Image (cartoon, rainbow, N blue to C red):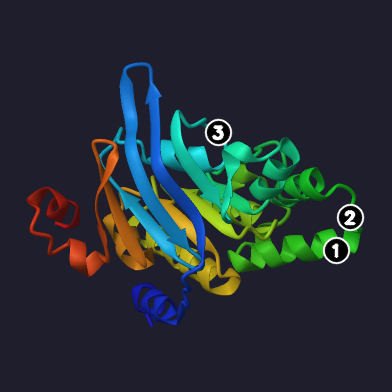
Amino acid sequence: MTIVESSIEIKKDIKQNNSVVVEMRNLKKSFEKNHVLRDINLSINKGENLVILGQSGTGKSVLIKCIVGLVELDEGKLLIFGKDISELKNKELIEIRKKIGFLFQSGALYDSMTVRENLEFPLTRQLGSIPKEEMNSLIVEALTDVGLEEAIDKTPSELSGGMRKRLGLARTLILKPEIMLYDEPTTGLDPITSKEISRLILEVQKKYNTSSIIITHDIECAKLTANRIIVIKDGVCAAQGSYADLEKSADSWIRSFFE
């Protein structure tokens, strides 16, 4: 079975429910005179992969940075697990953020550390001192999930681009997040490796029942991973639906993403 066929089979098995884990209401964000997000309204259900498409500079990455608190909203409401984050005290906000995993474009790896040390870092930062056996078990599980168990003593500089992406994903998964945010997960990768990363996204969704937002320009990644797609134009959600629905849209601009 090919990677594409395997991904489709995984996708068929994904179970979603109507429990909303992230909701954005009239979300706005500007940088001086640049109105990036003008009026964003969307929600993500438990167990759903939501892909966001749009031209460069339309605020896709800004949107997910708002979720993890890297960018502060100007207006609107952002609810995570039903809680308005603007009303949370610092301790409550930290607890919410522990449930969110963010895979950066670069992987945000420490080149001076081994693979093992890169995974130990978030564990000790978030959980403090934990027994050595428990830490090793979590590290091995995370690396096994992404097929990197044999690279445990290597450094990131010894890994290929695709392996570095997988290591970044392992470092995020080790804390068992309920929400995953992927910022251009296949950028800079060859087509075969891109499909492997897309397949991993589906496997993570299936194993951990994660709710994910996937920002991508890679239409094949969108096709393989999305339960639902939203297209952003001029700072608003211009269209949403399945891949099959949107590629047949009556709007030629929407269709252009799928050609």
**Lower sequence index among marks 3 and 1:** 3
The answer to the question of whether label 1 and label 2 lie on touching residues, with beta carbons closer than 8 A, is yes
Identify the residue shown where x is 19% and y is 52%: 257
Between 195 and 66, the one nearer to me in the picture? 66
In front: label 3 or label 1: 3
Identify the residue shown where x is 43% and y is 63%: 49
Q: For the residue carrying disc 2, how many other residues have a C-alpha within 10 Å: few (<14), some (14-19), or many (20+)?
A: few
Secondary element type, mark 2: loop
Q: Which residue is mark 2?
A: 130
Q: Which residue is mark 1?
A: 134
**Position of the N terminus by quadrant:** bottom left
Marks 3 and 1, how far apart in space? 31 Å
Identify the residue shown where x is 72% and y is 36%: 90
Give above or below for 202 relative to 36: below
Marks 1 and 2, how far apart in space? 7 Å
Residue 110: x and y in percent read 66, 38
**Lower sequence index among marks 2 and 3:** 3
Residue 254: x and y in percent read 16, 52
Residue 194 relative to residue 117: left or right = left
Q: Which image quarter: residue 227?
A: bottom left
**Residue 212 visible at all:** yes
Between 45 and 114, the one nearer to me in the picture? 45
The answer to the question of whether label 2 and label 3 lie on touching residues, with beta carbons closer than 8 A, is no
Q: Which residue is mark 3?
A: 70
* Tag 1: amino acid: Glu
Residue 25 relative to residue 122: left or right = left
Secondary element type, mark 3: loop
In front: label 2 or label 3: 3
Between 13 and 245, the one nearer to me in the picture? 245
The answer to the question of whether label 3 and label 1 lie on touching residues, with beta carbons closer than 8 A, is no
